[in-house]
Amino acid sequence: MRALSNISLPRIAQGTEYNKLQAERSNETRLNQNFRIIQGSIAEMEIIENSMDKRIESLENPAFSPGISSVSDSTDWRVVTLNTNDVFAAERSNAITLAVTTAAGSLYKGETTVTPPSVFSEITSVQVTIESASDCLFALVKDFSTSGINVRVLATASGSYSFRLHIFITGKVTA
């Protein structure tokens, strides 16, 4: 912000008439400068305020938001459908116990299948993570379709393991 000019009061008792007029003109010039600075600052603040209002409005009403058409929760899945016919589904599976006994290099593998919700006409991607209380396990998607998601579970030792899968699916729903 710009600094305002100092206004000095003339010493009337000690000054001549000429000095008094000069001081008044100088103060008048300074007051006018201050007034212009204040007006400019107010105008700048109004521009900033207007800009902030537009930013807030754009956040509250995004121009390119697809909009949520529906959200449904079942026992296992939360399914979010957008107005663009895109679908997102997320699940935290119940506890799964799986025998991981087939050797795969220096690891052991087992496979399980998860059935996706029936809303999908097309699945474009699947992400899976694994949650195990005590064992070091890895999960990856072997393949997927609208009828099933095949998940491969890897472990460092052969055995029977208990775990939960966290699955996130993106895809399309028929219009």
Image (tube, helix red, strand yellow):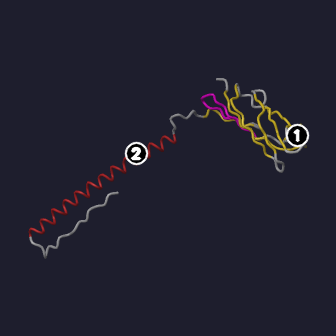
Left or right side of 88 for 92: right
Looking at this view, is 41 or 140 the one in front? 140
Mark 2 surroundings: few (<14), some (14-19) or many (≥20) residues within 10 A: few
Front of the two marks 1 and 2: 1
The residue positioned 20% from the left and 69% from the top of the image is 9
Circle 1 SS class: strand
The quadrant of the image that shows the N terminus is bottom left
Residue sitting at the far left? 17
Instruction: Let me know if residue 75 appears in the view.
Output: no
Instruction: Let me know if residue 174 appears in the view.
Output: yes
The residue positioned 89% from the left and 37% from the top of the image is 102
Looking at this view, is 108 or 80 the one in front? 108
Q: Position of residue 172 (x, y in %)?
A: 66, 27
The quadrant of the image that shows the C terminus is top right
Report the predominant secondary structure element of the magenta stretch. Answer: strand
Q: Is residue 79 magenta?
A: yes
Q: Give me the C-alpha separation between circle 1 and circle 2.
A: 62 Å
Left or right side of 30 for 57: right
Q: Which residue is mark 1?
A: 100
The mark nearer the N terminus, 1 or 2, is: 2
Q: Position of residue 126 (x, y in %)?
A: 72, 34
Q: Position of residue 68 (x, y in %)?
A: 61, 34
Depicted 115 relative to depicted 166: above or below: above
The residue positioned 79% from the left and 42% from the top of the image is 138
Left or right side of 127 for 61: left
Amino acid tagged 1: Val
Residue sitting at the far front? 105
Amino acid tagged 2: Asn
The mark found on residue 50 in the picture is 2
The part of the chain drawn in magenta is: 78-91
The answer to whether the residue labelled 1 contacts the one labelled 2, judged by CB atoms less than 8 Å apart, is no
